[in-house]
Image (cartoon, grey):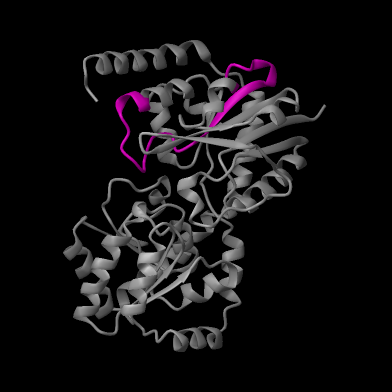
Amino acid sequence: MAKSVAIVHPWMPQYRIKFFTSLREELAARDIELYVYFGDTPPEWAQRNDSAICDSAIRLPTRFYPVGGRNLSYKEIRLLTRQGEVDLLILEQAIRNLETYRLIFSRRLYRKLAFWGHGRTYTVRKSLFEEWLKYRLTARADWFFAYTTGGADAVAKRGFPVGNTTVVQNSIDAVELRRSLAETTEEDSAWFRDKYDLTSNTFIYIGGVDDSKRITFLLDVAKDVHACDRSFRLIVVGDGPQARAVTELSRREPWLVYLGGLFGADKARALTSASAILNPGRVGLIAVDSLVAGRPIITTEWPHHAPEFEYLRHGETAIVTPDEKMVYRDAILNVMSDPSVIVGLSRNCLAESAKYDARVMAARFADGVEEAIETERPRDGVVRKMRRWLLRCDRRRKSGVA
């Protein structure tokens, strides 16, 4: 009899489409049926304009509740409950999803429960209570799918069994990006460089145009770099709340080229026209773009990088500077004065890139699904360990330690 698994994803960004398509194929080959549900795009992500519709997934109407500067969400789960019992239900490891608290107690909907996520909070500061609640939820799961090795280590330190975790190596469709890059001809690149008056000292930023990426920091440094060397150019690709400010600056400053969101061949053309990626703020899946395109990232030791920052190594595939504007500026000027640095980093990026792709991620995820369905969790010892950790958190919270 075929097994079944259901995933409730917070929303559907474009970069997840290939993963879910590949995962469906992987699981079908193992006689496991996949159901994917997703919510509406959160308001804070909507301005990035990178949401998508996945024909094989089911949208769950979502309500958002602003609380303390954040948005909690509740996805209507009636469509999910009509599906009947699945062998494995996979939820996002996040305390903001209000439907999670209902689903974990709806045992008639699933045989086993898993969470999928970072493992710990990477990108923002969280209170002790918020972390306590996240691990309280995680402790109820039979399996954990971690974005990266660091996430798996984080839940293991709180008592979750190492043997009941899968590291999926979160990724994008690297094959498609690699194909788009290969199909970009020298004539395409020359036309693009001429159109935007680009030079050999052109850099690129790709991602959300918002506070998490520290756009203001980036533009302040870029102004200083251009003041030191007039050949400097910066392409900004992406959309978000600060897009208007970037657009207005680009009209005044010829060294700044703002192109909005780009995908496929257009994104590849922009990448090939730059020597490196500048991103002083949160580095996440852009790490995969960097490796695949052979365009090293120059970033900072900012404490809120996403899990995928683990894919990079300072001095080998990236440059990571102290979190100071002048130091960051000098690092950019240094690579402009010595192009051989970028050449070496680029070579290492390309060599490292084979490890990451949505299909590789799907295969790892499918392996984990099979194991999760078949493996019994050694609950007693794990629960005792998790309870001890949670009790310590309780005592610290009650004593006023945040």
Residue 276 visible from this viewpoint: no
The quadrant in which residue 266 appears is: bottom right
Residue 315 to residue 44: above or below: below
Left or right, residue 97 beside residue 58: left
Residue 325 at x, y = what percent? 20, 62
Q: Residue at x 27, y 18 (%)?
A: 397
Question: Which quadrant: the C terminus?
Answer: top left
Q: Residue at x 53, y 22 (%)?
A: 101
Residue 171 visible from this viewpoint: yes
Task: Report the front residue among 125 and 354.
Answer: 125
Q: Residue furthest right?
A: 1
Residue extent of the magenta highlight: 103-131
Task: Report the front residue among 216 and 323.
Answer: 216
Residue 267 at x, y = what percent? 52, 70
The magenta stretch spans residue 279: no
Residue 139 at x, y = what percent? 47, 20
Q: Residue at x 69, y 27 (%)?
A: 78
The magenta stretch spans residue 114: yes
